[in-house]
Structure formats: C-alpha cells, structure tokens
Image (cartoon, rainbow, N blue to C red):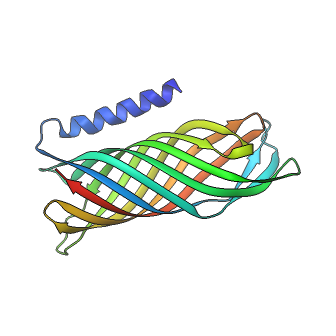
Amino acid sequence: MDRYKKINYYFIALLITLGANADQRSYWSLSAGWAQPGDTEIYNANRNHIGDLEFDAGMVIEGAIGNQISDLPVAYELAIAYQQNEVSGNRDGTAISDDATLLTAMANGYYLISCKQSFTPYGMVGIGVLDADIGVVGQDTVLAAQFGAGICYPLDDESCLSLEYRFFVAEDLQDEGGDIELDSQNFQIGYTRYY
C-alpha cells in the first residue's frame, strides 16, 4: 500500500506544481451515471483459470473539488467515487451471486480544448486507489487509473453541465481464492460550480 501512496503523492504534487504560480479558479462538482464493469475471469496463484464473473450495469456517483488554471487549458482535482453493480458467476464450480462495490479516491487532470462552439470538449486522466468489495469473492485495495473525454456546456459564468465517458482500470484484485482482473466503462452527467 505504501507504493500506492507514493505514486499518488507524486501525481498530486505535479498537479499542484502546475498551478502554483498561476491564477486559479476553484470549483466543486457532482456527477452520477451508468457503470458497466467488464466480464472477467478468476485465476489462482499459478495463473490457472478457476472461475468467471459477469457484472450487471450499475450506478456510479462522484464528488470532486479542484482548480482550473486561468492561463492554461488545464484543471486538476481530487475526486471520490462510489460504484455499485450486481455480480454473478462461478468459482471452483460454486455459483456466485452478490453485490460489488467500488470506492475510489483519484487525482484527476483535465485538458480543455478550445473551440468556437458554445461547449468545451476535454480529455482527462487520473490515478488513485480503488477499494473493491466483491462480496463472497473478496475485498482488496489496489492502484487504479482512468482515462476519459467529455464536453462541458456552460449554464452561466459560474457553472456548467458535463457529459463524460471514462474507462477505468485497476491492478488485479487478490484474495485467498485467486486474482481478479477489473475494468469498467462509465458514462456520467455532472454539474460543476466555480467559486
């Protein structure tokens, strides 16, 4: 877990350094949407296949605080998200049916693309920590990353609505029963307020 903390600290320090000497505009944001983890397989310590998992589409909610750098098309934030999905499958011939919950703490960076339209397209990348609880399958905390793109439509000078796609990946989850690969595709609608 210590190396995860170090990686996060370096990334956060980089984002803060980017805007340390620039005018910044602070904001908070809330978003929610549809989350679909990919179906995955379970492997034992010898990398032998011992089971399969299928995830149903679920929901994700996220809150963030951040800063947009006035002189650069860059923003950075710290975000916490909660995701829930139903999972079914089998492990070692035993049927599985349970809830999966994913809690993430991420440092995200955004690049805003200037255009002549009334909306602003952007790309984003983030790194952080995932705490995953897949019911009877197991629980683990691992390093995670996400990549995405979206558009932001201004409501006024102080707020905007966003529509965003994200692809989320994580290190293999480990428990006594084996290793589990995990990723998720999310579509989110959000509201951002500057202050």
- Horizontal side of 33 relative to 194 (left or right) equals right
The residue located at (59%, 43%) in the rendering is: 132
The location of residue 79, given as percent across then percent down, is: 38, 45
Rendering coords of residue 180 (x, y %): 69, 45
In screen coordinates, is 191 left or right of 114?
A: right
Provide residue 67's location: percent of width, then percent of height.
Answer: 22, 46
Indicate left or right for 114 with 77 as reference. Answer: left
Residue 173, image x, y percentages: 65, 40
Closer-to-camera residue (82/9): 82
* Image mark count: 0
Residue shown at 49% from the left, 61% from the top = 186
Q: Is residue 22 above or below residue 121?
A: above
Using the image, determine if residue 143 lies above or below residue 153: above
Q: Quadrant of residue 11?
A: top left
Q: Residue furthest right?
A: 93
Q: With 59 as the anchor, is 10 left or right in this view?
A: left
Residue 72 lies, with reference to residue 153, above or below; the image says above
Residue drawn where x is 20% and y is 67% of the image: 154
